[in-house]
Every structure is written in structure tokens, then in C-alpha cells.
Amino acid sequence: AKNRGRGTYAAYRREMRGRLEERALLERDLQFALGRGEITVSYQPMFDASSSRVLCYEALMRWTHPIRGSVSPADFIPIAEENLLIDELGGWLLYTSCAEAVKWPAHVKLAVNVSRLQLINNGFFATVVEALSLSGLSPDRLVLELTESAVLEMDDDLQDLVKRLNAIGVSFALDDFGSGYSSLNYIEKMRFSMIKIDPKFAQSSAEGSANSQAVVSAVVSMAKSLDMVVAAEGIEAGEQADAMRELGCTCLQGYHFAKPSAFVSPDRAASPN
Ligand code: C2E
Ligand code: CA
Ligand code: CA
Ligand code: CA
């Protein structure tokens, strides 16, 4: 930066070096994490806003490092993506969570996060098919969650992949909607069955922001006409749940109802934590 003195610059260099070393260590350990049984799956329920029944569980990857303890997927997924480890981890998660979901009541779906790098890998379709057939999970119970950034650039290959997955019954959810990108191009190309509205809208809508409420209403009416379910995620308080329900969101998820957990009770109804 422009105004940094020499001392600050040295400190900056030191900090950068520290971060790079930190990252290199994580990167090294991540290679062995799966084999050492350090990777697990947590499940967070998503509830029907009117009946309060569980509609779906979202599978979230967990890494318990022997020394550092729990490392956030927000930190290790990007590292895995850079090292092609994401295919191995993602494939494992897909199979493991499908095998878990088979045990749930048939109306309860499984949502799995997929990053762009996984999606554009040639083997992805085969990985999904294999996870479904090995586990015996019906394809119409699998929802793949993609962020806007994952589908912002849609080439023919990606469109073809989406079509093929749709054709076998797998559906898609648009994750973190409204968190950054604002192009709506991909919405008509993708045929999402669900939109997950970014947590900041639940917060500001509950605080009475008319702008935020107007945006949510608009998303809800667009989604309805395109036959998509609107989920509000990151709900941390009753007022947020009420606000988003009133604005027309039919699916609710967040710490207010349930945190991600290794243990799943698919028959439970939503109740505040
Ligand atoms: P995401 O898909 O947006 O997942 C929701 C994140 O918000 C999860 O964090 C969840 O624990 C957290 N969360 C849920 N309810 C609340 C709430 O009420 N308040 C707050 N403050 N947070 C809440 P987590 O598990 O740390 O995951 C972070 C991100 O890592 C995920 O964001 C997703 O983008 C990525 N991720 C997790 N598992 C996988 C995976 O298996 N594959 C890929 N590609 N990405 C994954
Ligand atoms: Ca997600
Ligand atoms: Ca999200
Ligand atoms: Ca996110």
C-alpha cells in the first residue's frame, strides 16, 4: 500500500510469509486427512415454513485436524480446489451422504454443496451416478447446491452436464443468492428448483429494511413463476424466521432451528433452539 513505512512493510511481509507457511502446512495435512479419518459430514436440516417438517438436510464437510482442531470448510475447501483434492473429498462426501440419506424417510432430500471446479471436471457426472447407484439413493432426492459464481460462466459443456443431471432426476439449488453477483442470465439457463437467499436479507428484513423486504418479495415472485422454492438460510432469530415466512419464503434453515450435526433425526419438526 501507498502509505506504508518500511517498518510496516516488513511487518506486512512477515505476516504474508506466516500466512503462506500456514497454508502450506494445511495443504500438506489435507492430503492425508481423508485417509486418517479426520474428514466427517455434518447435516443441517431445512424446514418447511408452514408445516415445520424437515424437507431436506444439507451435508457440510468437517475437518478435525489432530492439532488445530476443527478447520472451517471455508478455509480448507479453497485449498482442496487448488490441489485437485476437491474431487476426492467431494466424491467421498457425495457417496457418504447418499449412503446416509437412504436411511431417512423418502420425502427427506439431501443437499450437497458442489464447487465450480468439481462441476467442470469431466468425471463429475460419473461420480454422481456412482454415488447414487452404490448407495441406492433415488436421484430425485439429491439436490446439488451451486453458488452464483459457479454458474456465472456457462459454456455448452456445463449446460450439457446440467441437462444430463436433470434428466436423471437430480435437481439444483442456487446458494448464497444475492451475496455478490447480480447477473440473472444463468437463472433461465440453469432450471434451479430452489433459491437460497443470502443470510444478510433475513437480518435486514427483520430489522425492518423496506429495501431488503422489497428485494425478497421480488425474488419470491420471480421464483414462484419459475416454479422454484425459496429458502431463507442463516436464520438466527425468531423475528428473522417470521419476517422471511411473511415475505413468502417456504423453506427455513439456520442456527435458530438447528445447527449442523453429525446426528440426524429426520422426523423432527422445527423448534427454536
Ligand atoms: P454454505 O453452503 O453457505 O453453508 C452454510 C454455512 O453457514 C455453513 O457453514 C453453516 O454451518 C453455516 N450456518 C448455518 N446456519 C447458520 C446461522 O444461522 N448463522 C450462521 N452464522 N451460520 C450458519 P460451514 O459448514 O462452515 O460451511 C461454510 C461453507 O463451506 C459453505 O457455505 C459451503 O460454501 C462450503 N462447504 C461446506 N461443505 C462443503 C462441501 O462438501 N463441498 C463444497 N464444495 N463446499 C462446502
Ligand atoms: Ca450451501
Ligand atoms: Ca449458503
Ligand atoms: Ca457460502
Image: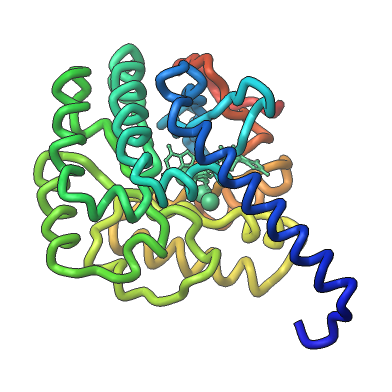
Q: Nearer the viewer, residue 97 or 178?
A: 97
Q: Residue at x 35, y 17 (%)?
A: 100
Q: Is residue 259 left or right of residue 8?
A: left
Q: Is residue 112 left or right of residue 24?
A: left
The quarter of the picture where the N terminus appears is: bottom right
Q: Position of residue 120 (x, y in %)?
A: 24, 55
Rendered image quadrant of residue 252? top right
Q: Position of residue 32 (x, y in %)?
A: 45, 26
Rendered image quadrant of residue 214? bottom right
The quarter of the picture where the C terminus appears is: top right
Q: Residue at x 29, y 32 (%)?
A: 91
Q: Residue at x 74, y 65 (%)?
A: 13
Q: Nearer the viewer, residue 61 or 108?
A: 61
Q: Nearer the viewer, residue 266 or 77?
A: 77
Q: Is residue 104 above or below residue 127?
A: above
Q: Residue at x 28, y 34 (%)?
A: 142
Q: Is residue 189 left or right of residue 204?
A: left
Q: Is residue 15 above or below residue 222?
A: above
